[in-house]
Amino acid sequence: MIPGQRHLPMLVWAARDIQRRPGRSLLLLGSLASLVFIIATALLFSQALKTTWSHLLEASPDLVVRRIDAGGWAPLPMDAAMASVRRIPGVLDPTPRLWGIATAGGLPVTVVTAPTALPAGSLPTVPAPGPGQAVVGQALLPVVSDGHLTLVGRNTLTVTVRGTLPADTGLATHDLVWMAPADARRLLDVPSGHASDLAIRLFRREEAPALAADLATAFPWPVAITTRDASALDRHTRAARTGSLAMLVGLPAVLALLLIVTAVAAGVWSIPQDLLRAMGWSTADLLRLQMAGAVIVGLPAVTIGLSGASVAVFWPPAAGTTALWITGGQHLPALVLSRDGALPVMLEIAAMVGLPYLTAVFLTTLQGAAGEIQSLPQVDPWN
């Protein structure tokens, strides 16, 4: 007999047994799917956030130098900074940058002036802003009035909105305002010949900590230096903390669902076991029947839960609401996250939920079958 044909009758029997108890089966399926959805949404969001940040940081400089004084951040003299940096071997392409924080309609925004501050893929569809113009992220559209945007920084400036940044770059550009350098200097009160910071690329990236120490003593004023590895570690930590907190918040619901799954898995048989044994069924047959039924219910439940979590995390209209739920208030419109690394996380979640579920069904069935055998009447063959 072909091996697959040997298991087909058991699967058919298990499917008919499930049809005899539709309420119990739907409750079990819904509980498992909800459990998978809760766990998968939090873990997939954390993984996707970490991967997306890693991709964005790949294009960032190796070192960022900021001038500081008694009041905190201070504008950086470009000529003096460039002369100090060029004396350090291993430093490539030092670039002064002009950017800062302002508000628009009560919303905090990031003002940038260089197209290199935008993520890859956004420039081909975005026209460069001229004097008095700006290109804004999707989050700024509600505060744009008659095509104009009023920004408040060290000074107040009203610009004409020439275009918007693509929705699929929302994680990096949702609160971004790209404007001409002269307008940004007036808004942020940065004098001519000064920059916000200095972006540095290195010949050997692994030498960043050592070169950061050399750079700290090369400038004639105090500076704060941030490495790309430190930024990446901070982003990864924040992503892991986001997923962990979401899991802790959903823990009571997860425990309740586990109790439902355990109670339903220990439910009564639609056909008494003693009748099945009278028909010639063995303990192994009873185990195969229950395991087949568990797979018939569990596989669609896991698939539904993972599919729902994928939609909640990776579909832009839903991803913004998911971010609002998980982060506790950070609503990111048209959030687009990377799908890299999602498959291993899905397999891990399927194993986390599926294996305990199958184990519970197996042990419950085995215990019930053993108890059924012990409860059978003892027959004396000599009487």
Image (cartoon, rainbow, N blue to C red):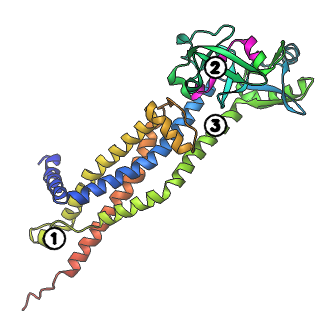
> Any mark on residue 15, and which?
none
User: Position of 320 compared to 273: left or right?
Assistant: right
**Residue 353 vertical placement versus 155 (above, below):** below
SS type, badge 2: strand
> Any mark on residue 272, and which?
1
Mark 3 lies on residue: 235
The alpha-carbon separation of the residues under discs 1 and 3 comes to 57 Å
Q: Are marks 2 and 3 in contact (CB under 8 Å)?
A: no
Report the magenta residues as a range. 171-185
Q: Is residue 97 at all visible to an observer of this figure?
A: no
In this rendering, which labeled residue sits more in front, label 2 or label 3? 2
Q: Position of residue 134 (x, y in %)?
A: 64, 14
- Label 1 neighbourhood size at 10 Å, few (<14), some (14-19), many (20+)? few
Q: Position of residue 29 (x, y in %)?
A: 30, 53
**Residue 308 vertical placement versus 375 (above, below):** above
Q: Residue at x 80, y 25 (%)?
A: 65
- Label 2 neighbourhood size at 10 Å, few (<14), some (14-19), many (20+)? many
Q: Position of residue 189 (x, y in %)?
A: 81, 20
